[in-house]
Structure formats: C-alpha cells, structure tokens
Amino acid sequence: LRIWQKKWTERHSQVTPDRVEEILKRALKLKGLDQSDVEVLMDIEEPELLEKLFVTAERVKEDIYGRRIVLFAPLYISNYCQNECLYCSFRASNRGLSRVKLSQDEILAETEYLVRQGHKRVLMVAGRSMASKILTNILESIRTIYSVHEDNGEIRRVNVNVAPLDVQGFKYLKQEGIGTYQIFQETYHPETYANSSPCR
Ligand code: SF4
C-alpha cells in the first residue's frame, strides 16, 4: 500500500530507460529486487519498455519454475476469525457458518489422507484469531503435517496462509521449514480496502 501512497509524479520521474534496463538486467540474475525497483517497474507506460519487462518476466519465470505446474492441497485448520472482510465467509459476523478448529489428531488424519492421494505440498490456512497460543498452535500444526510418512511419501512443503505475524513470529515459521508464507491483499485501492476489510 505504501507504494501507492507515494505521489505518482514522484515515482514516475524514476522511470527512465536506463533505470529500467538496469533493473531488468539485475532481475535476470534471480537474486530478487527491492521495493524501489518494483515501484519503477510498476510505473512503466512506454510500450517498448513494457515489452522488455514482459520478456524478462517470462525468462525469470522459466529459469525458476520451468515448464511445470505445481499443485498444492489446501488444508484448513481453523475457520475462526475476528475480522469482517465482506467478501469472506469466515468473517466474524457470519453466524451461519459452523466454526471448526482441527485438533492435532485431525490434522494428522487429514494429512495422511492427502499424502495417500499423492499430494506433496499443502497450503495450511487459518482465519485470523486472537485466541491465546495461536502461534504455538500454528507451529505445532506444521510439525504435525511434516511428521506424516506414508508408503507413497510425505508432505515436502508446508506453505502457510495465516494472519500477519511479528518478526519473531516469522522467524519461528522459518525454523519449522515452511515453503512460503502467503498473505493476500485483495485490493490496493485504499478506499475499497477500508470499506471491504473493516479489520478489528
Ligand atoms: S481476515 Fe482472512 S479469514 Fe478473516 S474475514 Fe478476512 S479474509 Fe476472511
């Protein structure tokens, strides 16, 4: 959001062909870009520079992922949520939804089932809860998923989609060997965001 709160004119003045070329060249080294680089790329308007951006993006994608499709299975461990995002059935005021929080035994059983189906990756999902020990529960759930070993394999990557954490929380997630952490922001339009996600 901070990217969009900067004045457009201020950002756009940084979009010169030389700067874009330099960023795209660095992108091809697959070491990542920082926020100021991304700001410049998002403000490109000239068709020629846009085309270079798309070509570079395709090469980066090919180098990192190749021509493969990676499947993952969602594993919802809790649909309790304190928030009120209007587009989401997990929102706290939705009284028509049965609330469930899986026990570790249930997570174990779900994981065994997924592994037997051949899954190697899961996306572990939980609503935003202020329940005490929520982080402890998340970490324990990751360990439970990784503990499953069946004849045809195990889960190699637990990706995580839970409420934002503090820095120490993210360090704990990393220690558990997660694949990726995901957080979605459905819109970058400040007013729409404020109206659709009146978070508490
Ligand atoms: S915080 Fe996530 S789970 Fe909760 S209502 Fe919003 S989108 Fe749904």
Image (tube, rainbow, N blue to C red):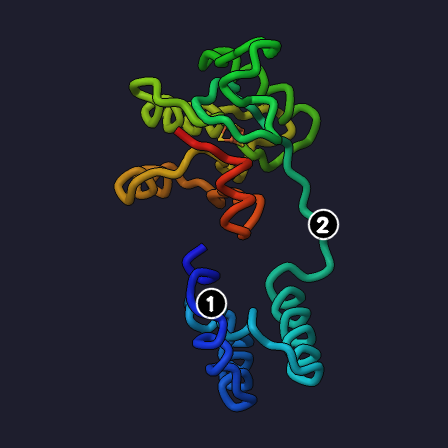
Instruction: Assign a secondary structure to mark 2.
Output: loop
Residue type, mark 2 in image: Ile
Q: Which residue is more in the foreground, 78 or 141?
A: 78
Residue drawn where x is 60% and y is 12% of the image: 97
Q: In which quarter of the image is the N terminus?
A: bottom left
Give the percent coordinates (x, y) of residue 27. 52, 74
Residue 92, relative to residue 173: is it above or below? above
Q: In this view, does 104 lie above or below 11?
A: above
| Residue 20 vertical placement versus 199 (above, below) | below
Separation (CA) of disc 2 from disc 1: 22 Å
Disc nearer the start of the sequence (2/1): 1
- Tell me where residue 117 sits by quadrant: top right
- For ligand 1, tell me if the residue under mark 2 lies within 8 Å: no
Looking at the rendered structure, the secondary structure element under dot 1 is loop
Q: Name the residue under label 1.
A: 32
Q: Position of residue 123 (x, y in %)?
A: 56, 34
Asked whether 33 or 140 is in front, the reply is: 33
**Image disc number at residue 197:** none
From the viewer's perspective, tell me whether residue 13 is left or right of residue 150. Answer: left
On screen, residue 113 versus residue 27, left or right, reads: right
Q: Counting other residues with Cα less than 10 Å from the Cα at mark 2, is it few (<14), some (14-19), or many (20 or more)? A: few
Q: Which residue lies furthest to the bottom in this view?
A: 18
Q: What's the residue at 54%, 83% (across, down)?
A: 20
- Point out residue 155 in the picture as x, y percentages from the top left corner: 55, 33
- Relative image position of residue 158 (x, y in whole percent): 51, 36
Residue at image point 61% right, 10% down: 96
Task: Return the residue at label 2.
Answer: 69
Q: Which of 6 and 136 is in front in this view?
A: 6
> Which residue is depicted at the point 30% across and 38% down?
169
Towards the viewer: 167 or 99? 99
Can I make out residue 100 in this image?
yes
Position of residue 133 relative to residue 105, above or below, is below
